[in-house]
Amino acid sequence: MRKTSGASPDAPTKFMNLIRIKCAFCGKCFSRTAGRINEARKFGWRQYCSIECQSRIRFRRIEKLCANPNCKNRVSRGLSQFKKSKSGRVFCSSLCAAIFNNPLRRKIKTCLVCGKQFSGQKIYCSSECHTSILRKSDSQKRREILKEIKAFYDKQGRIPVKKERPGLAWRAQKAFNSWNKAIQMAGFEPNPVIFSKKFIAKDGHKCDSFAEKIIDDWFYERKITHKKDIPYPQNRLLSTDFVVGKNLIEYFGLSGVLDEYDKLIREKRKLCKKYKLTLIEIFPKDLFPVNHLSEIIKTKKLEN
């Protein structure tokens, strides 16, 4: 009779499919069939050498330095706690958390007298500034306000907007009962509502808003050749505020205010992307209270 071995005929093929891989927790190499490895890769599962490693990774702890820069303590937290933290910061105590987070939550104000920045509920940075306001007579306050308005005009060549000088506007409201009355007393015509009428720039261009006039005059003063209200390619219903070379400059004054206006912004961005045009976007915060055009617009790039 023919002798047979005790091993199964399929045993060699069974072990030939084993592949060596590393445990996702301890890094130890272990063997697993190709089918199980492919299944884990398909579903994005991590693979472990044992049940112990699989359970221990859930409670793995990570050490980090306390997020308070003045504290050198090391903090140990569970992996799940790190995942819950939106900022990724950890603190060794509630005191360190307060020291780090409280300054970020404070609202920074500008003193209406000296211009110093401070935080708190008060209107003035100090009792000295508050007292100096109380000691001044009404006529003295009015003279100082008019002097500041004239000084702004001499420097900028135009009347200030409320957003540019909130402290001055507040004092003018108290002294003259209105901002426009203070402007008139200084010998100037008050600025109309920003989008209420057309403005003529220094080079004769008609601008739809006072903000557009500021941008147009900025180009004119720097002798940068620019065109106004040029239609977009393949869409003559949409026009760009300014064109300098191959650069399109748009002032999005009502961004985030009107839904229809935001749709137009998205449409203009799509056209610029489609035709590979450079779009420079300008918003009210870029002009008021401080003009940041020089930082946003690269003069050399526009001239080329």
Image (spheres, grey):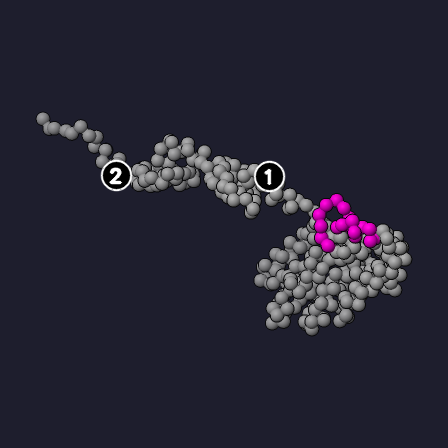
Viewer-side residue, 94 vs 36: 94
Residue at image position (44%, 36%) is: 60
Give me the disc on residue 16.
2
Q: Is residue 200 visible?
A: no
Q: Is residue 244 left or right of residue 208?
A: left
Q: Is residue 125 left or right of residue 97?
A: right
Quadrant of the rendering where the N terminus is positioned = top left
Is 129 included in the stretch rendered in magenta?
A: yes
The image shows residue 214 at horizontal and vertical percentages of 74, 64
Confirm whether residue 56 shows in the render.
Answer: yes
- Locate residue 275 relative to residue 237 in the image: left or right: left
> Which stretch appears magenta?
116-133
Give the residue number, with chain letter if any, for mark 1.
95
Query: Dot 1 surroundings within 10 Å: few (below 14), some, or many (20 or more)?
Result: few
Mark 2, Cα crowd under 10 Å, few <14 / some 14-19 / many 20+, is few
- The answer to if 137 sits in the magenta stretch is no
Q: Quadrant location of residue 246?
A: bottom right
Question: Residue 277: horizontal and vertical position, in percent?
Answer: 60, 63
Q: Secondary structure at mark 2?
A: helix
Q: Residue at x 11, y 28 (%)?
A: 2
Residue 179 or residue 174, whichever sits in front: 174
Is 216 situated above or below 169?
below
In the rendering, at what x and y percent does residue 15 appear? 26, 36
Type of amino acid at the residue the image marks with label 2? Met
Which of pointers 1 and 2 indicates the residue nearer the eye?
1
Pick whichever of labels 1 and 2 is earlier in the sequence: 2
Specify the amino acid type for callout 1: Leu
Q: Residue at x 64, y 68 (%)?
A: 299
